[in-house]
Image (spheres, coloured by chain):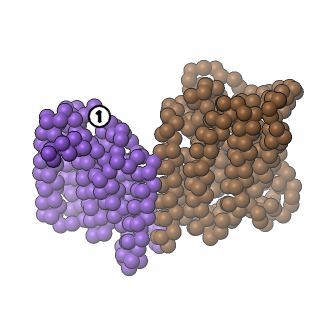
Chain colours: A purple, B brown
Amino acid sequence: MNETAFAQLSTLLSGLILFFGIALLWRRSLHAYIDAFQWQSAVLAALLVIVGYFEQDVELYLVAVIFFVLKVIVIPRYLNRLETRVGGEREMRPYVNAATSLVVSGALVLLAYVITRPLVMASTLPTRGGLPLAIGLVFVGLFVVITRKKALTQVVGFLVIENGIALMAVLGTFGIPFIVELGVSLDLLMGFLVMQVFIYHIHGTFESIDVEQLNQLKH
Amino acid sequence: MIDSYWLEVVQGLLALLVAPGLVGLVRWVKARLQNRRGAPPWQPYFELRKLFQKEAVISKNASWLFRFAPYIVFGSALMVVLLVPLIAAPLPLGGIGDLLVVVYLLLLGTFFLALAGLDPGTAFGGMGASREMTVAAIAEPTIALAIFTLALSAGSTNLGRIVTQTLVDPSIAGSPGRVLAFVALFIVTLAETGRLPVDNPATHLELTMIHEAMILEYSGRYLALIEWAASLKLLIFLSLLANLFAPWGVATEPTLLALGVGIVTWLFKLALLGVIIAVLETRVAKLRLFRVPELLGLSFVLALLAVTSSFLLK
């Protein structure tokens, strides 16, 4: 593989982004999840700037700014407000415990490497080394949504999946058309606000955001 | 190609002399950071001399294993010191200086130390042995995986070859796999050498001790050998971290100048890593024991990612 500075830097930053995603499986407090998501989005915005610089694409700078404002400032502010209102709980008993989750996440990233191997072999992009990490991030986000019990953690897991898809777009196609980017950001914001309303209602009904409590609605 | 066996003798003696000083340096920096004066960095030398002069008291329930184990622990640590490239690479004994040999020699020492903890039948010894085995069970494959990442790019699991290959081709030194492997190996260093946040080296409280619990029954020359072996282990791990990932300065030819440069850069790298460990120990609190497998699981995942990214991206 051609170890240019661009290739190494993009793979290194993708690895760091994946690391923040894996931190969701290890930490327990809800505030730590919001922090990890903020750092992850900040590094992703930095990666957008770097790709824009190396590919001489000015549009990517604008996309990076929108991304930064949306995911590092706006959404975490809403999340923090949500957490002060309904939080105070920690992820103490997830469906899969922390040590096993970490090993499973390693297996998931391994799976991502195996799946994207034909793509990485056939590609000639300098950023192709980070593609398996992006798909791995999507898997890890999905795993967080499946195995965690607090509604807030599941929301952060969903946002991490979205980050993984954005990372794939950055590495695989050097960004997507500006209009599409705006549409996706708006959809994400709308989805997040709806989820927020849901969490307020869950908390109002059960005095807790443990989604196992929703099983009581079955009868 | 360095052929003279004098190099091995020099390296062994140097390591034996420097190891207690390294532990003393870490303690001294920690003391200064905690606003204490602290003992001077050469205090462990006085402690070793005191211990060698004292009488060894052995419990009546202890078997031959109790008397045998300190020599095995010290011997295996010394053997690893002769195989790992500290000041020069490749070494005359480097032919057997394979990654797996080093990992299993270290594990041999840990195994016999745990057995020695169990032997006198005390409660603390058994507790320390079981905790140590929990840590070692997860830490050992991580060491192998992390160094294997380097072996992949060097084309051989021989430690001397890994060092010389990175010197020959510096561009592979910054690849993401190696960064991940460094972080994983650093976490394992903290675990295997009994540093915070895994184990507090300065405590004798039942709640928090792992390594100290196993050696609680030892005294006199046995304790001196075990303490020396523990400081040798710290030296080995820090040298691995320094020389495998940033090998510049290691001597590759048998001239006196190259060896001098090798010794000076090795001491500098050890001091730097020691200071980093002291700062880290001051910053973090000890992890609760049920969370230690989580930390080691994280380092295992990082090592796994390192190997995968180095292997599947070729």
Is A17 positioned to the left or the right of B198 in the image?
left
Q: Is residue B201 above or below residue B249?
A: above
Tell me which residue sits at (69%, 23%) in the image: B39
Quadrant of the image containing the N terminus of chain B: bottom right
Tell me which residue sits at (65%, 52%) in the image: B240
Q: Residues within 10 Å of mark 1 (few under 14, many from 20)?
A: some
Tag 1 subunit:
A
Residue A211 pos. (x, y %): 23, 44
The reply to whether residue A39 is in sight is: no
Q: Amino acid at mark 1?
A: Glu
Tell me which residue sits at (56%, 62%) in the image: B149
Q: Nearer the viewer, residue A86 or B126?
A: B126
Residue B282 pos. (x, y %): 54, 30
Is label 1 in a helix, a strand or a loop? loop
Residue B158 pos. (x, y %): 69, 64
| Residue at the farthest front position | A219
Badge 1 is on which residue?
Answer: A89
Residue A79 pos. (x, y %): 22, 40
